[in-house]
Amino acid sequence: MRGSAALVAVAALGFSACSLMNAPANPELPTWVHRPSWSISTVYRERIEASSRDETEPYERGRPELDIASRRVFVGSSDRGFYAVRAEDGTVLWRYETLGVVQCEPLYDPEEDVVYFGSNDGALYKVRAADGALLWRFMTNAEVARRPVIVGKTVYAVNANDTLIALDRRTGDRKWSQHRTPALGMEVAGYAGPLVWRGLVYAGFSDGTVTAYDAATGVERWQPVDLSAEAEETLGDVPRYLDVDTTPVPSIIDESPVVFVGSYEGGVFALDADNGSKVWQRPEVTGVSELVAWKQPGHPSAAGAPEPPRELLFAASGTTGLWALDPRTGEDVWHRPLPDGGVSAPVPIAGALLVSTTLHGLFLMSPIDGSVIDGIHTGAGFSMAPAAYGLRAFILSNSGSLLALHVTPPPI
């Protein structure tokens, strides 16, 4: 499903799509308006939401979750419902009603064939994936939007009130919890999810701190690392926003474990995973809400020469654009000031990155240099990040329609 305006523009300018593929991203106008590569096509677009949605919030946040084996898509909605949808054609299989809008990142557990999801009603839900039957519901008393994590017999989740919770996976009973007093004054919408790694749970909070807890007991293993103090030193003044809203990302640098986190005004940090000490900081990369690690294995080039493996850390910011950083040093590999209105986390697909924007649709970008490969606009913006597997991607638009997209790798 494509508009003809982009094709006419390309023909009128006398350029082919291939000749324009290396043009830099234009922050004022989507580059694909003048040079589509036909890499993105729409498989279907189905309105799935209840009529009550028209009376609620005009946007959809979170991200779909995919059950690959049974070909199901799970997604929350501002109509207060959580949906299971048939991936092939967008048919709604079941809907679970909550007491608040559902703007979450669900988690599908194939071992039990269940789905965990949160709602703005303050609860974390566990439902049967086959029919949506409720198995348990735990009230956290604040919005639950970030993706929970399962390790062994425990489910870990974070709510919008800076509370980290460990629950029994089978019963939903609380094992332990940790709470930090939210920062006074202004806060940025959004918050960090949990990372469970190497026996620890890492979490960032609205007061500007990052902390690690024992995954089994909840005992604090780090002294809280105050990134707002680092921001104050960089800015020369007390930062207006203290938030650490990015879910920590694990990595290994020179055989040492690190976690990457983003402070809204302090930039992006690499912290020693054992003690929280700073490995590096990029203070210019501000306003970051999502961090994504990306790896590409070594492979032969088109000319037959070996291409080395690559690793990048992508930082998505609603104020400074999309950044690709060297995870070893934090140095820029590339930076693109994307169109206004916000940008989602970049999602790897077909060797490229799929990014949604609030006002200008979806972009397919090169992870190597940030150039725009293709784009598609459906007439409705996207506040949700897409979910992808193989060459297929799924996303719920702000108008309440589920889109299934096919991405074809562009020709060399």
Image (tube, grey):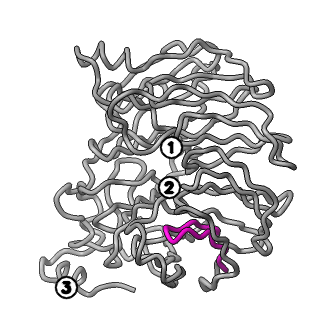
Query: Residue 100 location in percent, x, y?
Result: 55, 61
On the question of residue 163 being in view, the answer is: yes
On the question of residue 308 being in view, the answer is: no
Residue drawn 50% across the image and 52% down it: 301
Q: Residue 8 carries which label?
A: 3
Residue drawn 21% across the image and 84% down it: 5
Dots 1 and 2: beta carbons under 8 Å?
Answer: yes
Query: Residue 174 location in percent, x, y?
Result: 78, 38
Q: Compared to 344, does 358 lie above or below?
A: below
Q: Give the range drawn in magenta.
A: 74-86
Q: The residue under label 1 is which amino acid type? A: Val
Q: Earlier in the sequence, mark 3 or mark 1?
A: 3
**Magenta span includes 76:** yes
Residue drawn 50% across the image and 43% down it: 292
Whole-angstrom CA distance, mark 1 to mark 2, is 8 Å
Between 265 and 252, the one nearer to me in the picture: 265
- Disc 3 element: helix
Q: Residues within 10 Å of mark 1 (few under 14, many from 20)?
A: many
Q: Circle 1 sits on which residue?
A: 292
Q: The residue under label 2 is which amino acid type? A: Val
Q: Compared to 5, does 152 lie above or below?
A: above
Between 143 and 333, the one nearer to me in the picture: 143
Query: Residue 161 location in percent, x, y?
Result: 53, 37
Whether residue 102 sits left or right of residue 345 in the image: it is right
Q: State the predominant SS element of the stretch in magenta.
A: strand
Q: Earlier in the sequence, mark 3 or mark 2?
A: 3
Q: Circle 2 sits on which residue?
A: 347
